[in-house]
Image (spheres, rainbow, N blue to C red):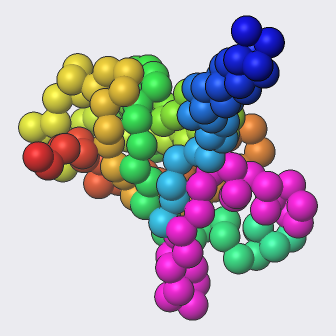
């Protein structure tokens, strides 16, 4: 029995380490495809963009802010707001948050619901976890990554 005890303990240790190995994956954030002013396209996560801004805000403001960005990710929340878009002109706006706020950097943007391009878009179908894609200009990246002038909101369909 004494000869089997070390082998049994070793086997249990190996099995326990194997079981825990799957849970070490870091949450990297949502993927952003950024088209810079010179036409080059750079792909990075929200976490990488936030880290870049944190270490060198001048670099972020000069080379990334205002660039065209495409984002694809899961909806976390959708809120409806009344927003003034011109003097005395108000419209309904859908404020979307992609990615879980508790898990790290997320993306926020507004879509004008009354825009003709969304006449057939069902905003009520957007629930937590619904995959969407949108384009816009890269805005502030302080607490979250903000997309200004968001457009081309679309559902992402999973192909079989």
> In the image, is residue 51 part of the stretch drawn in magenta?
yes
* Count of numbered badges drawn on the protein: 0
Residue situated furthest top in the rendering: 1
Q: Nearer the viewer, residue 83 or 79?
A: 79
Q: Nearer the viewer, residue 152 or 88?
A: 152
- Residue at image position (52%, 34%) is 99
The location of residue 158, given as percent across then percent down, is 19, 44
Residue situated furthest right in the rendering: 55
Report if residue 1 is visible in the image.
Answer: yes
- Residue at image position (32%, 42%) is 132
- Residue at image position (88%, 66%) is 56
For residue 121, above or below residue 64: above
Q: In the image, 128: left or right of 36?
A: left
- Residue at image position (31%, 30%) is 130
Q: Nearer the viewer, residue 66 or 131?
A: 131
The location of residue 69, given as percent across then percent down, is 49, 63
What span is in magenta? 34-57
Residue situated furthest bottom in the rendering: 38
Q: Quadrant of residue 3?
A: top right
Q: In the image, 160: left or right of 63?
A: left
Q: Quadrant of residue 53?
A: bottom right
The location of residue 48, given as percent across then percent down, is 70, 57
The location of residue 2, given as percent across then percent down, is 80, 12
> In the image, is residue 79 part of the stretch drawn in magenta?
no
Report if residue 13 is visible in the image.
Answer: no
For residue 91, above or below residue 136: above
Q: In the image, 156: left or right of 135?
A: left
> From the image, which quarter does the N terminus lie in?
top right
Q: In the image, 15: left or right of 71?
A: right
């Amino acid at each position: 029995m004494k000869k089997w005890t070390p082998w049994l303990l070793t086997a249990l240790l190996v099995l326990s380490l194997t079981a825990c190995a799957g849970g070490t994956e870091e949450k990297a954030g949502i993927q952003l495809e950024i088209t810079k002013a010179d036409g080059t396209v750079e792909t990075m996560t929200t976490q990488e963009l936030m880290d870049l801004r944190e270490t060198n805000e001048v670099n972020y403001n000069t080379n990334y802010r205002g660039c065209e960005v495409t984002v694809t990710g899961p909806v976390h929340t959708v809120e409806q707001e009344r927003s003034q878009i011109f003097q005395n002109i108000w419209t309904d706006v859908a404020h979307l948050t992609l990615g879980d706020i508790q898990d790290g950097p997320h993306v926020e943007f507004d879509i004008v619901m009354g825009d003709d391009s969304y006449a057939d878009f069902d905003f009520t179908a957007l629930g937590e976890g619904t995959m969407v894609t949108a384009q816009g200009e890269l805005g502030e990246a302080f607490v979250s990554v903000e997309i200004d002038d968001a457009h081309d909101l679309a559902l992402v369909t999973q192909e079989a």
